[in-house]
Image (spheres, rainbow, N blue to C red):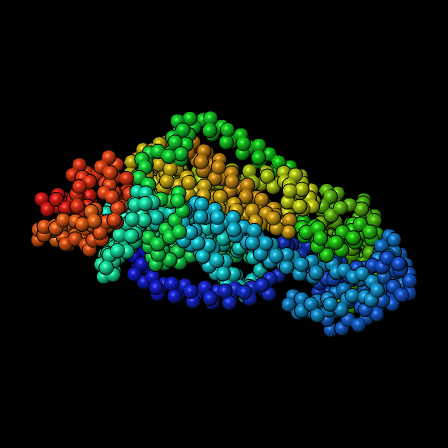
Amino acid sequence: MLGGLGRLIQRQRWTSLVLILLITVFAAAWGAGVLAKFKQGGFEDPKASSTTVAKLGATYFGSTNPDVLVLYRSDRMTVDDPRFQAAVVSTVARLPKERVAQIISYWSFAKKADADNLASHDRHQTIVTLKIAGTSDTARNDNYLAVKDHLAAPGLDTRLGGAFPLGTEFGEQVVADIVHAETITAIPLFCLLVLLFGAVTASLLPLVVALFSILGGLAVLHLVTYVADVTSMALEVVTMMGVGLAIDYSLFVVSRFREEMDRGQRAAGLPPGKPWKQGATRADRRAAKRAHRALPRDERRAVRKDYKDALKPVVRAALGRTLATAGRTIMVSGVTVSAALGGLLLFPQMFLRTIGLAGIATVMVAVFGATILLPTMLALLGPKVEFGRMPWRRPKADKDPDSGFWFRLGTSVMRHPVPYFAVVVVILGVMFGPFLHVQFGAVDARVLPKDSPSRGVFQTVQSQFPNQTAEPIDVVLSGDLVPRHWAPSKKGDNIPPFLEAFRKKLAAMPGVTDAKFTGYAGEYPGVRISVTHRYQPMDGRAQQLVKDIRHMSVSKDGVPMHLDVGGSTASQMDLMSSLMRTLPKMALFVAVATFLLLFMFFGSVVLPLKAIVMNVLSIGASFGAIVWGFQYGHLAGVLDFTPTGSVEATSMILILSVVFGLSMDYEVFLLSRIREEWDRSHDNRAAVARGMQHTGSIITSAALLFLVVIAGFSMAGITVVKLIGVGMFVAVTVDAVLVRSLLVPATMRFMGRANWWLPGFLAGLHAALDLRERDDLPVLPAPAPAAVTPAPIAVNWQPTPPPQPSPPATDPAPNPTFPAPDVPAPDPTHGPWRPWADGRPEPETARPQDSKREIVPNHDGSGWRWSSVKETDDS
C-alpha cells in the first residue's frame, strides 16, 4: 500500500505540492490564533477537595491569594507618611469598579496589627491586593490588561506580582524561550545536517518538514482550545517535538531514498550523477563538462532527455521502496509515540491532558510531513537531492556489508555479551540512584528567571513582610445549618457557637499560630477559616496538619457538616495523590498499546516486552539525572536557576511519556532493520550485526540532531522547561549510546532464536494484523528484453572516433554521444577513464585504444555491463 502511495506521489508530485502549500498557508494563519487562547495553571485535580476550596474562594469568599499584588516602595517616605498614603490611595481609588472587584491596602484596616501585615519591616514598602472582576477567565484577563498600566503611583517605585502578572509573564517567557532556542540552534543544526547528509539540498529538507510540523501542530492545537483548556507549556512541546521528530523522520526517509536511488541507478547502469559531470579526478570531471558543452545544442538536449527518461523509473521505484520500508516504520513509530503520549489523557490535570493532545497532534503532523510532504519534494528533486554535495559525499566503491564500525561493534557485543551487559547495567543503576531520594514540590515564581519582575515581588514579600512566608490552610465548612447571608459586621455580632468552637479547636492544634474567619456565608451556605502555621508549605509537619484537619468532624445537633481543606499544601498533596492513582493506569495503557503495536510489526512476543524494559531503563537514568541536577542543585550554576530542593511532579510525568515514546522510536527503527535481516538469513547474530550496521549511524545521527534541538530548550528561562530539556537530553543520550548500541544487542544474544518466538495460537492473529509490507514492494528497474531495452549511454574516448558499423537489428540504437575532451589519451597503466566511478572492475575486453565505451544490458537480462563497440558488434 505504501509503495503504491510512493508511486502515486511521484506521478502527482506537482498537485501534491500545491495542496500541501495551501494547507501550510492555512495552518500558519489559523495556528497563530492559539497564542491568545492559552490558560494558566492546570496542575490541580478537578475533583480534589483543595480544588473545591479554591473554586469556592474565587466564586463566593474571595481568594486568599490575590489576583494582583502591587508593591509600592519609597526610599525616603514610610507608610506612615501622609504623602505616601495619598499617592497610593489616590492611585487605586481611580480604578474602575467594573474592572476591580476588591482593593485591600494598609489603610483598609481599623486594627494596626492587621494593617502591619501589609507593611514591610522597614516600613518603606507596602502591598496592595486587587481582586479582578469578571466571571470568566477571558473577561478577567481583559480587565487586568485594562488596569495594569494605571497602577503606578506618583513618586513611588511600583512593581506588580500575583497570579495575573505571573501568568502573563510566564506566557511571554515561553514565547521568548522558543525564539531563543530556535535562534541559537538554527545554525548548529543546519551545519550538523550538512555534515551528516553531505549535501546542502538534502540538509534543507528536514528543516522544511520541521517548519511544516510546527505550523500544523499549532493549527491543530488551536482547534483543541475550542473543546478544552490549553496551557502555554503546550507551545514548548509542539516546538520541541515538531522539530525533533520531523528531523528524525526526515533523516530516515532521505537516507533510505538515497540508498534506494543508488541501488536503482547501479541496477540500471546509470551514473550516480549527471554523466557529463562524472570522472575519477577533478580534471576528468572538468573535461567531461567541456566535452558536453562542445556538443551541438540538439545533441545536448537529447543526452539530457535520455538521462532524465532513464531516471524516471528509478526515482519511482526508489520512492516506492522508501515509503514501503522507512515510511511504514515511521508510521508505526508515530503511532507508538502517540500511544505513549495518549497515556497523559488519562490524568485529570489540564496541564498533562493538553500537552498530551498537543504532542499527539504534533507527532501526527510530523508523520504526515515525513510520508507525504517529504516524498513529494524527493519526487520533484530525484537525483538533485544531492545538489551542493560536499567532498566527503563523493561516490565510493561498494563496501562489504559485513564490515564497518557498527557491524564490528555488534559482532563484538554478540561475542562477549556478559561484560557489555554488566557494565551498562551498573552505569544505569548508578544514574538511577539519586531518584530514590526524590522530593516533589509545587511550581512558584522561582521557576522564572532571576530578573523577572513577578519573581522579584514574590521574593520581596516573602523576605521583607511579616507573616508572609507561611501559606495558610483554608478550611471550608458547608451545609444547610450554616446561616445564609450571614457575616459579623461589627464587634459584638454573635458567631454561631458551633462555628466558633471549631475555629478554636483549629487554633489549638500543634504548630498553628492563628485561625480566623476569612469568608462568610452568602449565596453559598458555607464559611471559610484560614489556619496559619509556622511551617513551610511542603514541610512534613504542614502535610500532617492537613491530614489531621481532614480527619476532623464537625456536626450540630447530630447533623454532620461537610469539610473541605485547601491551600497550597493541600493542593500539592492532592496533586501527588491524583498522580499516584492515575500513573498505574497510564503505565498499563501505554504498555498494552505498545506491546500490541510492536507485536503486529515484528511478529514476536519477546521483542515488545524487551523493548518496554529497555525504555524504562533509559527513563530511570534520566530521572536520576534530574534529581541530581535540579533537586540537589548541581546544575544550578551551569543552567542559571534557583534550586528549590524539590522537582515538579507533573514535569516528571511529562518526561516519562515523551521519553518513552522517543526511546521506542529508536527501538522501532533498529528492530525493523534487524527483522529484515532475520527474515533473509534466520541467523540471529548476523541479523543483529547487520541491522546495527544499517541503522547505527542513522540512529546516532538522529539522536545527535535531536540533542541539538533539546539543548536549546535546556537554556530556557523557565526552570520547568530546563528540567524537561535536561531530562530528555539525558534519556536520548543514554538510549543512543548505551541501550541501543550495547544493551539491546547483548540481550538479543542472550535470547537467541527466542527473540522471534511466536506461539502457534498467535501466529494466525499476527498473520491477520501483520504491519510489515512484503508483496507490494516496488521492483527496482531491471533490463528489459533486447527488443525494448533502453538505449545504452555511450561515452566517446578519442577526439576523432573511427566510423562505427551499424548494430544488428535486434540491438538497441545507441543514445546520442558526446565527444571526449581535447586531452591526451588515458594512460594505459591506469586503465580507461570510467565516468560512472562505481568501483566495478573493468572487463578484460576494455582497452585504452577502444574508440567507444558503452553500458549495455546482459544478454540474460540479469543486469548491465561495460562493453566496447567491438564487443557489441561481435554480439
**Image position of 220 with respect to 463: above or below:** below
Residue 632 sits in quarter: top right
In the rendered view of the protein, which quadrant contains the N terminus? bottom left
**Position of residue 758 in the picture relative to residue 627 (left or right):** left
Residue appearing at x 82%, y 51% in the figure: 464
Nearer to us in this view, 776 or 532:
776
**Position of residue 61 in the picture relative to residue 436 (left or right):** right
Residue appearing at x 64%, y 37% in the figure: 437
**Image position of 108 with respect to 782: above or below:** below
**Image position of 773 with respect to 223: above or below:** above
Nearer to us in this view, 103 or 17:
17
Q: Position of residue 507 (x, y in %)?
A: 82, 50
Q: Position of residue 639 (x, y in %)?
A: 64, 45
**Residue 584 visible in image:** no
**Residue 617 visible in image:** yes
Nearer to us in this view, 314 or 656:
314
Residue appearing at x 54%, y 34% in the figure: 428
Q: Position of residue 417 (x, y in %)?
A: 43, 28
Nearer to us in this view, 866 or 768:
866
Residue 279 sits in quarter: top left
Q: Position of residue 33 (x, y in %)?
A: 55, 66
Residue 815 sits in quarter: bottom left
Residue appearing at x 40%, y 58% in the figure: 373
**Position of residue 203 in the picture relative to residue 760 (left or right):** right
In the rendered view of the protein, which quadrant contains the C terminus? top left
What count of labels does the image hold? 0
